[in-house]
Image: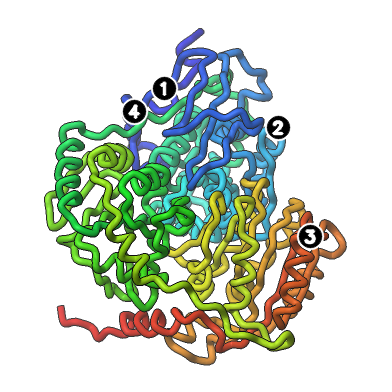
Amino acid sequence: MAPSSLSAPFSHWITDSSRPYRKTNHLITKSAKIHSAINRDARVGSLETSTLPSKVARPHNGVASIVQPSYSIAALGPSEATLGYHLARRLVEIGVGDVFSVPGDFNLSLLDHLVTEPGLNLIGCCNELNAGYAADGYARSRGVGACVVTFTVGGLSVINAIAGAYSENLPLICIVGGPNSNDYGRNQVLHHTIGLPDFTQELRCFQTVTCHQAVVNNLEDAQEQIDTAIFTALKESKPVYISISCNLTSIPHPTFSRKPITFSLSPRLSDQMVLEAAVEAAAEFLNKAVKPVMVAGPNLRIAKACDTFAELADVSGYAHAVMASAKGLVSTEHHAHFIGTVKIMSRVLSTAFCAEIVESADAYLFAGPIFNDISSVGYSLLIKKEKAIIVQPDRVVIGNGPTFGFVEMNDFLKALAKRLNRNTTAYENYRRIYVPDGRPLKRDPKEPLRLNVLFQHIQNMLSSKTTAIVEAGDIWFNCQKLKLPSGCGYEHQMQYASIGWSVGATLGYAAGAPNKRVIACIGDGSFQMTAQDVSTMLRCGQNSIIFLINNGGYTTEAGIHNGPYNVIKNWSYTGLVDAIHNGEGKCWTAKVCCEEELAKAIETATGPQKDCLCFIEVIVDREDGSKDLLPFSSRLAAANSRAPVPR
């Protein structure tokens, strides 16, 4: 075989100054392992093998189990030796079975290749923003997602969703159909641009919200660029951007003449000496504490340490909680020593009696925390750094120091579990002070429905066969109170908090996890942002249950700063969904105003209409909200309105 017939996907390369559009943020070194052995199965990341026909095991806590196929290096026919087929095969290889797209003239030829690939299902969305949100939701259920849009008008539309995926550490392949390769450098103006001959505007925008960018406008290095981008997305657990010239996808080229070599990620390794020192210091710190606790944070996802955290909690006996942004990542809500959700590190806003136990601890271990103005309510943290061990994906900080770098979270938590003395004191204190949550006030059968009654019913719907998708806003606080049964999924976007995210995410998550029934909780203001892709859910035959909470406006914003702009035009939401349905597909809708109607609607949605997309519009009072909303709003308002400090 001639050396030129195979291109090593991740060989080290330097940006050629003569090719100004060949950009990247991360150069992959020669040490990246390439599995060049023939007929050998490989795996991506810390993944487990699977026998599922889709080649993807269902992820546990956001970690996909992607199984690489065994490829021979048999030659491909000319029609298959193209960039388009190579990209399609790579997507299937990493576990992408569904690609979310919006067609445009620059990506049509590429879409032809994706449609032809038997392992891919192309899902057309109503707009690019929802396609990105759907890829986000898909990545949460399958471990990696992908979307395809057209140049600039599509790219700049999808970029908000890509930014959200970046904030949540989700590997997502954003593919853009780019201009004809001959148009680069010709100083001419194209449509779908801002009217300048410079085509780099889209690229420059994506550089801030992706970990790697590749502009493919020649075939010589196309395979290398595509493979490097995909590799980087998996390695960094972040979105990447790939632009492909529209005239290149169907042209045979020698670099695509053979099936691609399978590749795998080398496991990240800790520095053993530093790891031992970190574990020694942490064990001493925690073992001398009287009432230590553990708290799970959202960076457990990127570290793929969710199960390891649960194992440490089980071995140590510590009382343990999750930060609001990490709810659903750690499957310990059914664990004997789970004490709740530390919503925003404030007694007033946390699960009952949880914050008191965390704050009164003389040592706490935070695994993967993110402290922002939401998680701390305007930075009003009540924890003390000198009592904390902060474990991030690649480092450990103990108290005010020292900091141990080059320590992987999984390695650290596993080693620490062997060194800790079992200590249940904090949990015993929690049991002493705990008083069970009260039930909603008794109501008349026809009394207007209240949110606390709605979420009591939603609680009863949760099981190992469901996943809750939670929109930003007051719904956060209501859903944080939900107690997740073992195996029940839970997804929200607390860091980026882009309202409207949940519609696309519901579409994508349901596509990636057909064995789960999604229960989506969406506010009316959020739904108005992205409602169109309910039609895509119907076209895909999905059976999600959407609770549309109609309270006439932006409740959370009104609590922070009220004004007429927080009131929205009321829609007939069930009428809208019925119109979208238009007699095609399986759909059932209901509008409920009292508990009796709600109970009947849920009974129908989970019984006779269990195979349908069920849309339940819930009418509640504009002033109805969770008890947490008022203190949250007032503290966030205070943080936002701080007077400028002279600099």
Q: Residue at x 55, y 55 (%)?
A: 485
Q: Are marks 4 and 1 in contact (CB under 8 Å)?
A: no
Q: Which residue is mark 4?
A: 12
Residue at x 55% of width, y 65% of height: 470
Q: Secondary structure at mark 1?
A: loop
Please state which of the two labelled residues, at mark 3 or mark 4, is closer to the viewer: 3
Q: Quadrant of residue 378?
A: bottom left
Where residue 329 sits in the image (x, y, percent)? 46, 52
Checking the image for residue 607, the label placed there is 3
Q: Determine the CA span between mark 2 and mark 3.
A: 34 Å
* Viewer-side label of 3, 1: 3
- The vertical placement of 339 against 346, above or below, is above
Instruction: Return the disc, 3 or 4, that comes first in the chain's sequence.
Output: 4
Dot 2: element:
loop
The residue that label 2 is drawn on is 118
Mark 1, other Cα within 10 Å: few <14 / some 14–19 / many ≥20: some
